[in-house]
Image (spheres, rainbow, N blue to C red):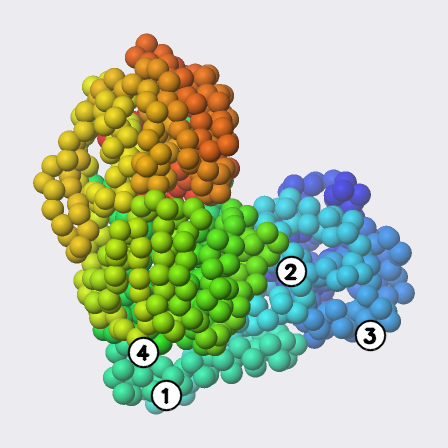
Amino acid sequence: MTNSISRIAIIGLGLIGGSWVFSLREKRPDISVVGFDRNVDSMEQAKSLGVIDEFAFTAREAVANADLIILSVPILAVRELLDEIKPALSNDVILTDVGSVKGCVAKDICDVFGAPLPNFVLGHPIAGSEKSGIQAVDPLLFKNHKVIITPLEETNPEAVKVVSELWALVGAKVELMNVAHHDEVLAATSHLPHLLAYSLVDTLAHNHENKEIFNYAAGGFRDFTRIAASSPKMWHDIFTANKQAVLDALDLFTHDLGQLRQAVAESDSTAMMGVFTRAKVARDHFSKILARRAYVEPMKTQQINYIANPGGSLSGTFRVPGDKSISHRSIMLGSLANGTTEVSGFLEGEDSLATLQAFRDMGVVIEGPHRGRVIIHGVGLHGLQVPPNTLYLGNSGTSMRLLAGLMAGQKFDVEMTGDESLSKRPMNRVANPLREMGAEIDTAAEGRPPMHIKGDKPLKGITYTLPMASAQVKSCLLLAGLYADGETVVTEPAPTRDHTERMLKGFGYDVQVNGDTVTVKSGGQLTATNIDVPADISSATFFMVAASIAPGSDITLEHVGINPTRIGIINILRLMGANLQLLNEREVGGEPVADIRIQYAQLKGIDIPEDQVPLAIDEFPAIFIAAACAQGKTTLTGAEELRVKESDRIQAMVDGLQILGVDIKGTEDGAIINGFGVEGAFGGGEIVTHHDHRIAMSFAVASLRAAKPIKILDCANVATSFPGFIELSQNSGMNVAIES
């Protein structure tokens, strides 16, 4: 498409437009560029620098015979310029601009031409410098920077494509956005900071001690006020053109600043820490936040593949990250407790951080995490506040399902959404029983996210028998029961993890457990406590299987949680003949833990007992790898829940293992795996993970018994449950790395 552009006219020779055409000329030397600027010196300098080939003495003369016209003038000058060039425009010429306000330009076009111009593509590069003018042009200014295109309904898609490709040609990343939304977002993220920087410097400059202030200004002052060195005329025009959106952002800031002033005046430590911790998280994610939402999809734009090379053995003593299930619940119950809860060993993975951010968004002050330490200033069962936006929960089904129970008991409405994977996962398993309790919940088709939960709906306790064993559904209903009138009784068909029951008791809440039935009733309180999160047995599983299948391996995994509802992996590996010992068994914060030593042993195929399936539901991708290395046939039944995890884990493992040459057949509720035994090995190949972290890590483990390299696609989501997986794998002896 860009081949149709052979002559560009640029009106206004400043930093932004000049840098764009300068870079385009490097990429496309065949393009000729004519420029116009009201300053003749700027035109002569642009020509001498090679930014333009020639210049014209009027804008109308410059645009004649151009294929593309770039308007790079102050926002308030656009209308006058359009009036001037209107008679010289051909029907097929493409126009675009580079201004940081789009609504006023769209209005100017309609005022001058009577309607939107189909070939006018509104654009805004998110790049710049405190320097200005043609002498500051930089051909690399837009490399890896975003450019926002804001097409109108009438805009020609072919024109949008041409302009987008020209931006991409200079290394920019193009995104599309609605005009009004663009102006609102830029008012908050760009225009308001510039306004504040100008104001602060002006205020301090009027101070009678301004010499001392500026002499002893620290780096933070210099960093913040650097943007006050930008062009005053340009920013005057921007504030004028985007007045209402800037005022809205300024009013919001003024309100929040007033609250912060009051907190400082009253030495309100909790309120101050709330502002500072939320701000730190928002700043850490600054490149990814939109409007006021601090937690976003960090994995969405990443493409990470693993290369797992054959062979190796494991050795050493080490600790895997904290238990994800307990980390989730520590944030939830700590937030709803009275007092301050301190958590150590918290899993700093994306899933757990999604839960943490959701409670920050609902007004809970949370310090950290820092090296697994989190301090939660609880607000009590009825202290949560309306979140400023949708609760974004990333890839975490646990967050959404458990929060659904808590949100059903609040006084305010809430919407919960997630990434592409989470948006495909069924939520009716929690939504339907919550509706029986009186909750009003809307979902997308087939019960999928987003979930809209209406507030202020009185809940009543119910007696509910789970149709399928699920700790997430059980926990959701127990948490809703904290707000429901009467008793909430949940019976499960098979044992599932009981972290919620244990932790509720740890926070002082009365929970009755009678065999396979759990009962709670409202009216109690949660009292803050300290929580030491054990190492996650699901994460430990990958190394337990790895050491079991790799000859010469001998490792010890420290402080692993061995909750009776989670030890299916230990039981199954032992049935397969694994050399596995539990050492230093003890109880920490109500949860049993132990050090686990695993040495290589030849595994044998088994019929996996169905009563062990719920106790190892998240560990089966790794168990598939163990079964493939075993001598003889392994049969799995009763595991239909695996088909509705982050991916269809049965099908994903069957497909991947068949690629590696394993004799395996999937069934409706499991699989039949014919292991290759002591003499066999996996072949090489390329594995599709379906963005599922456990699929990715399982095939990394397979490389220990592979004859050829295994390439594992789309591994970014490993960070949801196991940050640092690659480093720990390499240190323990596996030959796996991120593809460069």
* Residue 385, position as x, y percentages in the image: 41, 75
Q: Which mark is residue 207?
A: 1
The amino acid type, in three-letter code, at marker 3 is Asp
Q: Does residue 608 lie above or below 27 as drawn?
A: above
- Secondary structure under badge 3? helix
At x 89%, y 56%, the residue is 91
Residue under label 4: 271
Relative to 625, 238 lies left or right = right
Frontmost of labels 1 and 4 is 4
User: As drawn, which residue projects farthest toward the top?
Assistant: 679
Q: Position of residue 619 (x, y in %)?
A: 34, 36
| First in residue order: circle 2 vs circle 3 | 3
Q: Are marks 3 and 4 in contact (CB under 8 Å)?
A: no
CA gap, disc 1 and disc 4 = 30 Å
Residue at (11, 37) in percent of width and height: 583
Label ID, residue 714: none
Residue 714 visible to an observer of this rendering: no
